[in-house]
Image (cartoon, rainbow, N blue to C red):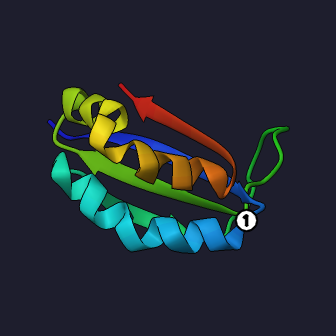
Amino acid sequence: MATHAVFTLSLTNPDRLAQYREVAAQALAKHGGAVVQASGSITRLDGAQDTPTMAAVLSFPDADAALAWHADPELAETHDLRRGAGNTNLILLG
């Protein structure tokens, strides 16, 4: 059964985000992952957290694949690009 991760970003460095976007799909695909939906159009429905600049839902074959993607040493620079784009959160559902 597929599992999902939710990524949010409050953008502070557009150049880093542009660099990340160039390599993100290939990095996800290495572990069977894909972007289900991503948007810079965010509407807060509830809650007290700051509204991020953008959010994405990622899909992986299972939790182990998501964890492998996150821990893959060959993708460390890719993850650093993502983190360097601004204030980020990444959570695994399930």
State the image coordinates of residue 51 (x, y, percent, origin top left): 78, 53
Of residues 27 and 76, the one drawn nearer to the viewer in this rendering: 76
Residue in view at x 42 percent, y 32 percent:
92
Of residues 28 and 40, the one drawn nearer to the viewer in this rendering: 28
Of residues 29 and 78, the one drawn nearer to the viewer in this rendering: 78
Residue in view at x 29 percent, y 49 percent:
59
Q: Which residue is mark 1?
A: 13
- The crowding category of the residue bearing disc 1, from other C-alpha atoms within 10 Å (few below 14, some 14 to 19, many at least 20), is some
Of residues 86 and 65, the one drawn nearer to the viewer in this rendering: 86
Q: Can residue 40 be seen in the rendering of this structure?
A: no
Q: Can residue 17 be seen in the rendering of this structure?
A: yes
Question: Where 7 falls versus 36 (above or below)?
Answer: above
State the image coordinates of residue 37 (x, y, percent, origin top left): 42, 65
Quarter of the rendering occupied by the N terminus? top left
Amino acid type assigned to the residue bearing label 1 in the image:
Asn
Question: Where 30 falls versus 54 (above or below)?
Answer: above
State the image coordinates of residue 57 (x, y, percent, origin top left): 43, 53
Picture quadrant where residue 72 is located: top left
Quarter of the rendering occupied by the C terminus? top left
Circle 1 SS class: loop
State the image coordinates of residue 13 (x, y, percent, origin top left): 73, 65
